[in-house]
Image: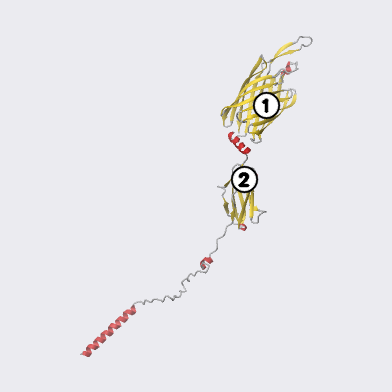
Amino acid sequence: MVNLRRHAMLAFGALALLASTNARADEPTNLVAPTNLVAPASPKEPSAVVAAPDGQTEGDRKRPEPKEKPAVHHAPVLTAAMAEDLVIEATLDRPHKLRRAVVVFRGGGTHGEVTLARSSSSADGYVAVIPAAAVRGRLAYAIELETTDGEVLPAFATRATPYEVTVLDDVRDRREAALLERLGGRRSVVETSTEYASFGGARVTLPGQGGAPERTIDVKDQFYRFEGSYTYRLLGLVSELGIRAGAVRGVSAVRGETDPSKYEVGLNYGAPRIRVSATNWLHFDAELLTSVTEVGFAVGGGGAVLIGDPYGSKIVFGAEGIEVFGARGYTRLDVVAHKRVLVSPMVEVTGMPHAETVGVRLLGEGRFDLGRGFGMSLRGGYQARTFDRGGPTLGAGVAYAF
C-alpha cells in the first residue's frame, strides 16, 4: 500500500514537471547582449554614420559646393567738386566671373553709366569716371555687376535708390541758384513795347526863296516807337545776353535843313546787348547799335551802370547814341513798391530824333507781374525842348518769361 502511494506521487510529479517544461518552451526567450558587443548590421540596412576627423560627414563631402558670386568693395564718395570729373574706385572679388561692372549715375540733368576698368596705379583696383557735366546739383550713383551667366547684381546701392553725393559749389553757383529760384526758374524773357512822345512842336524860320521874305513855320516835334526784345539770363559772371530790334518814326526840325519835307525822320535798328556782373550789387551793360536811318546806314552804341539789386530796387545810369539820329543820357530809379509792382521814375536828356535842340524828359513807368511768367508795363510823362513848349508821353508793353 505504501509502495503504491509512492509510485502514484512519483507519477504525478513527473507529469507536473513535463507540463512546466512545455510551458517554458512556448514563451519567447529574453536575452540581453553584453554591453561591449555590437550586433552586425543587416546587409539591407544603411551603414552607420561615422564622423570624419574634420567634422564633416561622408554625406556632406558628396554634396556640391555653392557657387561663389563676384562682389565689389567700395568706399562711398562723400563729396565732389562742382563741374569736375568724379573718380569712383573699387576692388572686385572673382572678376573672372564678371561680364562687366558699371557705375550708374544721374545728376546735372543728365544720366548714364560708365564701365569700371582696370586701374593703372593698382594691381587689383578698378576705376570709373563720372563726367563733369553730371557733377552739378544733386548727384547720385550705384554700382552694378553683370555675371557671365547674365545675372545682374546690385553691388552698391541700386538704380531705384542710388547713393547721393554732396556737390560742393562756390559762392557764384549758390548765388545763381538763388536768383534762378527767385525768378521762378525762368531764364528767357520776350518783350514787346510801344511808345508815343511829343515835344510840343518847334518854331523854325525858313529863308525866303527867289527874293521872298523869311517865313516862320511850326513843325511838329514828335516820334513813336515799336520795339521787340529777347533776353537770356545766364546769372553768372555774364549775367544776361539779349537783343532788341525796333523802328522809330517821327517829325523833327532837322538842324540845317530848309526843306520841310525832310523833317520826317526814321530809324530801323538792332542792338545786341551783354550784362556783366562785377558784384552782387554792381552790373554793367554794353550794347552795339546798328541801324538804317532816313539818310542811310549808321552805327552806334550804348551802356549802363546798375547799382543795387538787378531784379529789384536799384539806380541806373545810362547813355546811348547813334550817327545822325542823335544821342541820349538817362538815369532811372527802380523801387519795389510791392512784390509784384516795380515803380521807376526817370529823367532823360535827349537829342533824338535828329533834333536841332536837346530836350528833357520826365517819365514814370510801372511794371506789373501778372503771374505765370506774364508781365506788363505802363509809361507816362512829359518832355520839352523849350520852356514854353512841351508834350506828353504814353507807352505800354507786355512781357513773357519762360
Name the quadrant containing residue 169: top right
Q: Quadrant of the C terminus?
A: top right
Task: Identify residue for label 2.
Answer: 80
Q: Nearer the viewer, residue 304 or 8?
A: 304
325 versus 125 height, above or below: above
Dot 2 amino acid type: Ala
The x and y percentages for residue 230 are 65, 31
The crowding category of the residue bearing disc 1, from other C-alpha atoms within 10 Å (few below 14, some 14 to 19, many at least 20), is some
The x and y percentages for residue 94 are 60, 58
C-alpha distance separating marks 2 and 1:
42 Å
Task: Identify residue for label 1.
Answer: 318
23 versus 368 height, above or below: below
The x and y percentages for residue 282 are 65, 31
The x and y percentages for residue 366 are 59, 25
Secondary structure at badge 1 equals: strand
Dot 1 amino acid type: Gly
Residue located at (65% from left, 24% from top):
331
Tell which residue pokes out farthest to the right in this image.
Answer: 210
Q: Nearer the viewer, residue 89 or 297?
A: 89
Determine whether, in the image, residue 254 is placed left or right of residue 48.
right
Determine whether, in the image, residue 355 is placed left or right of residue 191.
right
Q: Nearer the viewer, residue 169 or 103?
A: 169
